[in-house]
Image (cartoon, rainbow, N blue to C red):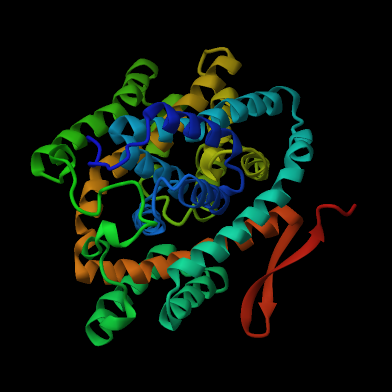
Amino acid sequence: MSQPQTRHLVPFREGLTYWARLGFINFGGPAGQIAIMHDELVERKRWISNERFLHALNYCMLLPGPEAQQLAIYIGWLLNGAAGGIAAGIFFVLPAFFLILALSWTYAVHGDVGWVAAIFYGLQAAVIAIVASAVIRVGGKALKNGLAVGIAALAFFAIFVFKIPFPVIIIGAATVGLVGARVRPELFPAPAAHAHLDEDPDDDVILGDSELEDGARPTWRRTLKVLAIGVTVWWAPLLVVIAVRGSDDTLSREAVFFSQAAMVTFGGAYAVLAYINQAAVQTFGWLDPGQMVTGLGLAESTPGPLIMVTEFVGFLGAYRFPGGLDPVVAGVLGAAVTVWATFAPCFLWIFLGAPFIEQVRGNRALNSALSAITAAVVGVILNLAVTFALFALFSSVRSGHLGALPSPFPSRARWTR
């Protein structure tokens, strides 16, 4: 879990300052957060090249859980090793944790959080502009030929119009890359490791194009060590909760359920909301019908990943079924257990897999597959951007058909009465 070898190591304090600030401004869901990081880290600070950024993003998009937070962990690890990744991941969600905690308490005790949306609504227009700019900028750099543009367009229509599962889109793009590299190799860029640092004055400050330090190489010893530490950190606190409270307690059930959800939440927060809503309302009775919409509204209106809606669910579930504790105390513990179960695995996925992903950057076949995935990811980000804009600008979006094609139809703008 040590850091890659670097030419100009970003001072840890400088990186820590950036990640702490990002936690307060990362509005807009995954599309907005990816856009903000790209603008700051690639365009302004020049801490990482566009190619390295997209390479890391490709991997994070394949993982369960919040891809934007995982991208922050990955880049933090590249810049400052394990300490940088931990700091990036924690500060990405820490401000949102306390804000959602306060708002969950307000909702549970007073039942009114409508003023939150009014306060933060004006920020959403700015986030939409940032996201649109990022899609254009990232797309301009990633879509280097007509094939890449076609893959991006197909990915967008597949997920936006036909609701094809995200993993299927990624597998399809990877297949196109692997096959296309054999048929038309000139359509796919050369692996990054084939380039020379002294030939590109705009290369990133990270020397990972050539080698990783021994401590970051994907060896069996390192892999087993990271796996043991990661699983222990993830499950030890949750097992303590289960042992103290009993397996039938709400806190214990939240620990198990959200740990399971953390391993199957592919495709972003919107894709998993139906799964969580069904369990929270029908299976466990933690929420009343419609309360998930309130929680999602809080997560959309505040900084942090949209999956922070799980904190709202955890608070209300434990508040409603405190198991002998003070309801507010139970709610706070429920929020903490839920957030830990949701986000702790993200660190494990990155620290376990990132060295392997860095090592294969020079593999011709895998690079072609990742180039196709990069194009598909641009389409997926565009889908996230459009989805966020629809929910931000319109209070009601219904499903319908445009001709023979399914399509969302916004029915009421938020600024109208």
Is 7 situated left or right of 43 in this image? left
**Placement of the N terminus among the 4 image quadrants:** top left
Q: Residue furthest right?
A: 417
Is 150 situated left or right of 6 in this image? right
Q: Is residue 399 above or below residue 346?
A: below
For the point 54% across and 20% down, the residue is 332
Quadrant of the rendered structure where residue 76 is? top left
Residue 193 or 131: which is nearer the viewer? 193
Residue 110 visible to the viewer: yes
Residue 278 visible to the viewer: no
Q: Is residue 214 above or below residue 56?
A: above
Quadrant of the rendered structure where residue 190 is? bottom left
Residue 237 or 148: which is nearer the viewer? 148
For the point 22% across and 83% down, the residue is 182
Q: Is residue 109 above or below residue 296?
A: above
Q: Is residue 178 above or below residue 248?
A: below
Q: Position of residue 274 (x, y in %)?
A: 54, 52
Residue 81 or 317: which is nearer the viewer? 81
Residue 166 or 139: which is nearer the viewer? 139
Q: Position of residue 143 (x, y in %)?
A: 45, 72
Q: Position of residue 234 (x, y in %)?
A: 32, 31
Is 54 situated left or right of 23 in this image? left
Q: Position of residue 17 (x, y in %)?
A: 48, 29
Is 210 situated left or right of 54 in this image? left
For the point 45% across and 42% down, the residue is 69
